[in-house]
Image (tube, helix red, strand yellow):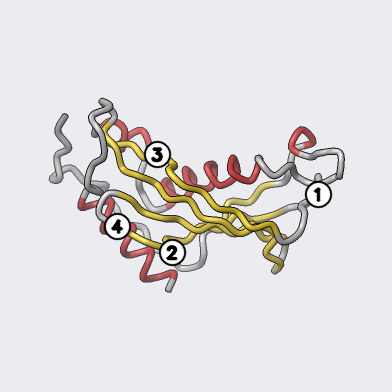
Amino acid sequence: MVVTPSQSWSSLARMDERFALRLSPRYMEVDQQGVVFNAWYLVWFDEAFTAWMRHVGVGYDELVGRGVDVQNVHAELDYRSGVRWGEEVGVEVDVVRVGGKSFTLGYTVRRGGEACVEGSIVYAVVATDGSGALEIPADLRAILEEHQRQAA
């Protein structure tokens, strides 16, 4: 399996303001207590990750086409207050850490200015052929590092 470093994404998007995926909980995501069931927040983080990658110019299909994928290897969530059905929230994404073969993204679910849920996910970079972990490709590393500096 070969990942060609000379292949790169065409643009390095800049975040002039914090990226947030806007959504409103669907009825099926709400439990009997009237708030979003806890497991759905990880789904929201995954949707925000994919949207953020598109926002910064990295198409997931292109990444996989290059033989590179990412796997969630660790997740943490802290619940501050419940989100109810029909409320509009934003899922903010920040680059927290960039390592050699993994990176960490931080997520905040906000209702207005209130942080309802905060969390992070560590993503390991892996080969799509199942051969194991890979170094973060140079062009992806540049994007992650640029956004890590902007978030600081």
Residue 84, numbered circle: 1
Q: Position of residue 120 (x, y in %)?
A: 51, 55
User: N-terminal of the two: label 4 or label 2?
Assistant: 2
Q: Amino acid at mark 3?
A: Gln
Q: Earlier in the sequence, mark 3 or mark 4?
A: 3
Cα–Cα span, label 1 and label 3: 29 Å
Q: Earlier in the sequence, mark 1 or mark 2?
A: 2
Closer to viewer: mark 1 or mark 4: 4
Task: Say what amino acid the circle numbered 4 marks.
Answer: Gly
Mark 2 → mark 3, Cα distance in angstroms: 24 Å
**Quadrant in which the C terminus appears:** bottom left
Q: Residue 99 shows which numbered tag?
A: 4
Check if mark 3's residue and mark 4's residue have beta carbons within 8 Å.
no
Number of other residues with Cα within 10 Å of mark 1, as a class: few under 14, some 14 to 19, many 20 or more: many
Q: Which mark is residue 15?
A: 2
Mark 3 to mark 4: distance in Å?
Answer: 14 Å
Where residue 149 sits in the image (x, y, percent)?
Answer: 36, 70
Q: Amino acid at mark 1?
A: Arg
Using the image as rendered, state which of residue 122 and residue 54 is in the foreground: 122
Image point (13%, 45%), residue name: 6
In this rendering, which labeled residue sits more in front, label 1 or label 2? Answer: 1
